[in-house]
Amino acid sequence: MKWSWVAQLFIIIGFLIFGYITVKFFHIPLPGSVVGMILLFMFLMIGLIKIEWIEKLSTFQLKHLTFLFIPPIVSLFISTAFLRMMHWNVLIIIVVSSICCLLASAYAVERYEKIKRRNIE
Amino acid sequence: MTAIIGNVLFCLSATIIFYFFGLKLFQKYRKAWLNPLYISSGLLILLILSSNINPNTYLQGSFIFDVLLQLAVVSLAVPLYKQWSFLRKNYKKVLLGVICGTAMGVISVSAMAHLFHLQDQLVASLIPKSVTLPVALTISNNLGGLTSTTVFIVIISALISVTIGPKLLKRFGIKSKAAKGLAMGTSAQMLGANRSLIWGEEEGAMGSVAMTTSAVFLSISVPVLSLVMNV
């Protein structure tokens, strides 16, 4: 059976709503979308949802993901909030902590791989 | 009602047209600085500011993209499912990279916020800065941050990470494919995962795995964080 784009979209929307309901019902402190993703992942694992049913749409969505980032960026620059936010200390924090985050994870992983390789030899 | 539908249609069509224009331009010249994201957003901003279109028309229509972004988060289950066996084999590496990166990000933000005497509200927006946007919004709402501030910080920090990241990692002699992918995915989320796909299959897989894991990791640790911060 061939699943059209619309059917695939409905499955994804269904899981988003499913996620929101689960969050409300069990008072989970996680975003509804993340819970929806976890639920969809579990359904894929136990085979209730076949990967072919949603693969086409989700691949397309993730391939054109940068598209979804245009509106927030545009909204920022055309709204007045942007100028109020552009403090030098906030910018410094963002730059420095981005560097910290990048280097910390890269170094930790590289170290780990080196130690592991040494143990094997 | 009709005004809202009109605004949404205007916002959607303008964004789609500019996105495809940016994409075509990038595919034609293949220059890194011609990133479709920068070009399309830049041109769209210029158009709105230079013409007499009311900026609010665009702003009011752009809520539709929040929904699309949330749907994209749900779709992340597909790459996660496909990479599951790969992830199981490398789970120690992934967890190590994601936790170290996210923790260092949060620690450095808190330390510098203390140094600069920032308001709690601003700090709450800064904490989830390295997580994918829809998740970051929810986290900062829980911590008491402002939505517009969080969007700004997440976007800017992803842009900065994705711009300086590859050069920085090269400078510091990081050669491991897993390390590069994980670092980009942890700090620049979706943009980083996209960028690490350019390096190759393994880096790309690591990037998207890191993005998902860091989102889940940080949203789980927020209840703990809010206890610590007393917000």
Image (tube, helix red, strand yellow):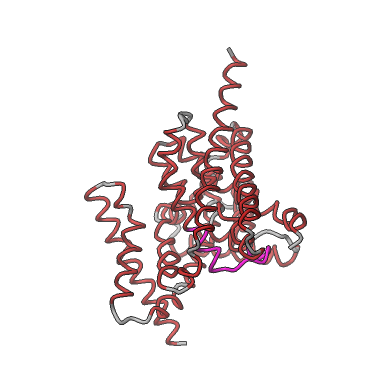
Magenta highlight: main SS: helix
| Quadrant (top left/top right/bottom left/bottom right) for the C terminus of chain A | top right
Does the magenta-highlighted stretch encompass residue B151? yes
Which residue shows up at 45% across the image and 66% down it?
A72
Does the magenta-highlighted stretch encompass residue B182? no
Task: Looking at this view, name the residue that lies furthest to the left.
Answer: B28
Reply above or below: B63 against A29: below
The answer to which quarter of the image holds residue A57 is bottom left
Q: Is residue A17 rendered to the left or right of residue B153? A: right
The answer to which quarter of the image holds residue A5 is bottom left
Which residue shows up at 62% across the image and 16% down it?
A119
For the record, the magenta segment spans: B140-155
Q: In this rendering, does residue A2 appear at all? A: no
Reply above or below: B39 against B63: above
Q: Position of residue A113 (x, y in %)?
A: 56, 25
Q: Is residue A41 rendered to the left or right of residue B59? A: right
Reply above or below: B66 against B96: below
Front in this rendered view, residue B66 or A6 = B66
Which residue shows up at 51% across the image and 34% down it?
B179
Reply above or below: A5 against A120: below
